[in-house]
Image (cartoon, grey):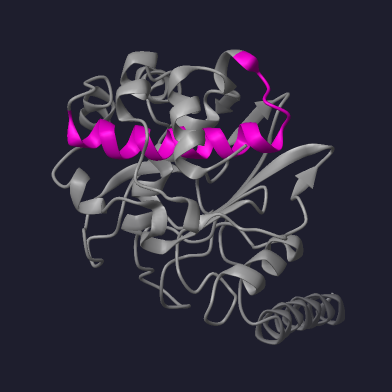
Amino acid sequence: MALLTGAFVAGILVLALVLVLLEVFSGGPSPATPSPPPQASASVVAAVAGAPGVALAAAAPGPLDAGQLQSGQPPLQVAGRPAVVFVGAEFSPYSAAASWALVAALGRFGTFRQLGSTLSASTEVFSHTPGFSFYGTGYTSAEVSFEAVEGWGDTLSAVAPAGYPTLDRVPEAVSGLLRRYDPPGGAGATLPFLDVGNRLVLVGASIGYSPGLLHGMDLAGVAGALGDPTSPVARAVLGTADEITAVVCSEDGMRPASVCTDQATSLAAAHLGLG
């Protein structure tokens, strides 16, 4: 019996040692998978993705210009559809600001699922800028493909590793776009990064309006402002959305016609010099 007991204890000690060694040589315990952010309310998403035509038309043309269009680049497509690629971070106020125009534009071509809501980090300039998080979000469209990489969370980690926690890893295909269009470093050094079919590329502040425009507002407040064609928020956000819409239409064969030939899109296309 004593021999059996000793063997049992020795086995337990060996197992414990193996577990310790595995943890040491694997760099410690695997970090927990971050939880998706709170979902944006259905009413907010509907107000943005289904922005009224009168507000879209009043906002056109927007703040972008023809000089921001790319020329001589191969079309960016997935499964025969023009691709829209977005790389952002929940901590970034410029990512939050850009997310409004992106949701308003792509909402005209398809449907989002599980859009998150977020506020930019308190430690960043333009702190607490409201916006949408694309972490864990889905999108369905017959006209356009959308890939979003929400790279980092919005709160500094209290444990190692330091910094903002990683949410999405950047796929190699997206890394190639960053190396081509997002200097310096080519690894999302400036956020956000938006590529619309390799025809329109917007990086950082080039989205056309400042996060300061949304200062002191929450998601519902911004969504409400988009319904007022005279508001600075609607003119900036929906004007940019009109121009993103016009570029998508120029790349997808002007489909659907109800979107691509309406007044707002036509004004934006003319402003950008899109044939």
Q: Where is residue 146 in the image (x, y as percent from the top left)?
A: 65, 40
In the figure, residue 55 lies in which quadrant? Answer: top left
> Which stretch appears magenta?
231-257
Q: Where is residue 255 in the image (x, y as percent from the top left)?
A: 68, 22
Q: Which of 198 and 227 is in front in this view?
A: 198
Position of residue 31 relative to residue 39, above or below, is below
In the figure, residue 95 lies in which quadrant? Answer: bottom left
Residue 103 visible, this angle: no
The residue at 67%/47% (across/down) is 197
Q: Position of residue 236 (x, y in %)?
A: 29, 40
State left or right for residue 174 relative to residue 274. Answer: right
Q: Nearer the viewer, residue 67 or 119?
A: 67
For residue 133: magenta?
no
Position of residue 84 relative to residue 88, above or below, is above
Location of the C terminus (image quadrant): top right
The residue at 41%/63% (across/down) is 204
Position of residue 166 relative to residue 261, above or below, is below
State left or right for residue 126 relative to residue 33. Answer: left
The residue at 47%/65% (across/down) is 165
State left or right for residue 271 relative to residue 54. Answer: right
For residue 235: magenta?
yes
Dominant secondary structure of the magenta stretch?
helix
Q: Nearer the viewer, residue 98 or 122?
A: 98
Q: Where is residue 152 in the image (x, y as percent from the top left)?
A: 48, 61
